Image (spheres, rainbow, N blue to C red):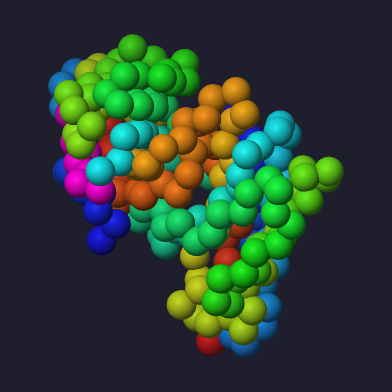
Amino acid sequence: ETGVTQTPRHLVMGMTNKKSLKCEQHLGHNAMYWYKQSAKKPLELMFVYNFKEQTENNSVPSRFSPECPNSSHLFLHLHTLQPEDSALYLCASSQEGATEAFFGQGTRLTVV
Amino acid sequence: SQQGEEDPQALSIQEGENATMNCSYKTSINNLQWYRQNSGRGLVHLILIRSNEREKHSGRLRVTLDTSKKSSSLLITASRAADTASYFCATDDADSSYKLIFGSGTRLLVRP
């Protein structure tokens, strides 16, 4: 257990569905991240939140919509995804800046 | 954009041997980190080395950093079958301290 919890662990959704991924940390960290990990590709940084404010949006398509209601919770809202969006989505948190990041176990997303 | 590049992409060794993985990066950094990932799971932080450090040890791990060559190496001594995993280097971005960028990783297989 790293202290970062992601739900669900697995998700299968159709291209017309709307779903949300949830991430929760109770480590007192002020930065939270969403990463996408596709097969045979490096981890792609998607979004960064610092003290609930979005500080990075790495040219992510609008069908991915992040939400950070407080420093402990981070959501990724998904709608009208494509099959190529199938991947492992990882959430992470860190105390400040790009120091040691704690990762959740990830959500394995399959878009059909 | 991808910051770190690891080599080799894959490494297979016998238990008890040492494993060396290399990482190269492109821009100025404040620190460099190494992470480990077991198949399909979240990443676990191993070690962080700051830009003003040249070498760091943690148990069976030894990390070096050469900022003039923009490269780092991770040495795992006396490897064990349980060390089988993917290993990633990650660097921060001097322009955005909350941006942690990962390389493509080295898949290590330690044969019993």
Residue A7 in the image: state x and y as whole percent. Answer: 17, 43
Location of residue A41 (image quadrant): top right
Q: In terms of secondary structure, what is the magenta stretch mainly?
A: strand
Whether A23 is among the magenta residues is: yes
Looking at the image, residue A68 sits to the left or right of residue A90; the answer is left
Q: Is residue A27 visible?
A: yes
In the displayed structure, A96 sits above or below B19; it is above
Whether B34 is among the magenta residues is: no
Residue displayed at 56% across by 54% down: B48
In the displayed structure, B51 sits above or below B27; it is below
Which quarter of the figure is the N terminus of chain A placed in? bottom left
Residue displayed at 58% across by 77% down: B60
In the displayed structure, B57 sits above or below B30; it is below
- Read off the magenta span: A20-27
Callout count? 0
Residue A108 in the image: state x and y as whole percent. Answer: 29, 44
In the displayed structure, B6 sits above or below A29; it is below
Which quarter of the figure is the C terminus of chain A placed in? top left
- Farthest residue, direction right: B68
Between A59 and A85, which is closer to the camera in this rendering? A59
